[in-house]
Image (cartoon, helix red, strand yellow):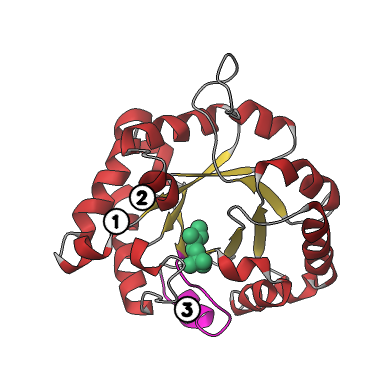
Amino acid sequence: MSRKLVVGNWKMHGSRAQVGELLEALKAGSARAQGVGVAVCPPFPYLAQAVGLLAGTDIGVGAQNLAVETAGAYTGEVSGEMLADVGCRYVIVGHSERRTLYGEDSALVARKYKAATEQGLVPILCVGEQLSEREAGTTEQVVAAQLDAVLDLCGEAALASALIAYEPVWAIGTGKVATPEQAQAVHAFIRGRVARGADTPTLLYGGSVKPDNAAGLFVQQDVDGGLIGGASLDADHFLAICEAARS
Ligand code: 13P
C-alpha cells in the first residue's frame, strides 16, 4: 500500500472559532500533505461547518460515533444517515474511550460498524489491548476477539479491505507510544487475519503519534497511516505528521 492515510480524531475539543482556525491552517499547509490521504473527525456540532470549510479540498470529514438505529425515538443519538447527509465520509467505531467510558462492547461495536456501511460511510474500526492484557501476553487474542465480533456479524468480505486502527489503550493520550516493532507486529497479525486474496485492509496506528515519532511508525511495512488524537489539534503538528507519511 503506497498512499498513506492520516486521520485526526479531535475527541471532545473545539469551538466554532477553533474549528475555523485549524481547518484554514490545514488548507493553507496542504502542500505538506501532498500524496497523503487526510481526514479530520470533529465533534458532532462542528461536522457541517467542517464539511463546508473543506469543500473543494481533498481533506475528508468523519464523525467519532454513530447510533445503530437509522431514525426514531432515540434521544441524544445521531444516526449514520444524518452523518452521511451532512457530508461525512468516515465514522470512527469502537474507540477505546467508547468501549471503556461508555460501556460499548464488541457486539455493539459490530452493529455500529454494520450501520455505518449500510449508510455508505467508511467505518474506522478501532481495536487494541489494555496494558494488563499486553503484559499477560494476550494482545493477539484480545484484538482477534474484537475483529471476530465484526466478522461474525458482517461477514469476511466486510473487513477484507476495511479501515482498521490499532490503538493500544496504554498508548492513548499517555505519551507512551508503541515501538515501531510493536505496532508492526500487531498490524501484521491483523492483516493476516482479515485480508482475503487481493483485498487487504488499510491499517492505521493510533496512540501518542507525534511529529517526532511518526516517521518511524509509518516506515513499517504494515503501518498504512495514523489515527492522531492530541497532535491533530495543532495544525503544525498534524501537518508535520502528514509530511512524515509522504516518504
Ligand atoms: P493520542 O494521539 O492523543 O494518544 O490519541 C490517540 C487516539 O485515541 C486517536 O483515536
- Magenta range: 206-221
Q: Which residue is mark 2?
A: 195
- From this viewpoint, is residue 225 visible? no
**Horizontally, is 4 left or right of 14 in the view?**
left
Q: Quadrant where the C terminus lies? A: bottom right
- Residue type at tag 2: Ala
**Relative to residue 64, is residue 223 depicted above or below?**
below
Circle 3 residue: 219
Given the image, on which type of amino acid does mark 1 rest?
Gly
User: Dividing the picture into quarters, in which one does residue 39 lie?
Assistant: bottom right
Residue visible at 30% across and 37% down?
Answer: 149
Which secondary structure type mostly characterizes the magenta part of the structure? loop
Label 3: how many Cα within 10 Å (few below 14, some 14–19, many 20+)? some
Give the class, few, some or many, for how many residues have Cα within 10 Å of label 2's Cα (few <14, many ≥20): some
Q: Can you name the residue that lies furthest to the left here? A: 136
**In terms of secondary structure, where does tag 2 sit?**
loop
Front in this rendered view, residue 199 or 164: 164
- Return the residue at label 1: 192
From the image, state whether disc 2 or disc 3 is nearer to you.
3
- Does the magenta-highlighted stretch encompass residue 187? no
- Residue flagged by tag 3: what amino acid is it? Val
Above-or-below relation of 238 to 128: below
Q: CA distance from mark 3 to mark 1?
A: 19 Å
Residue 100 position within the rendered picture, expressed as x and y whole percent measured from the top left: 36, 48
Mark 2 in CB contact with mark 1 (< 8 angstroms): yes
State yes or no: Cβ of the residue under disc 2 lies below 8 Å from any atom of ligand 1: no
Q: From the top left corner, tell me how far across and down residue 203 is, in percent.
A: 45, 59
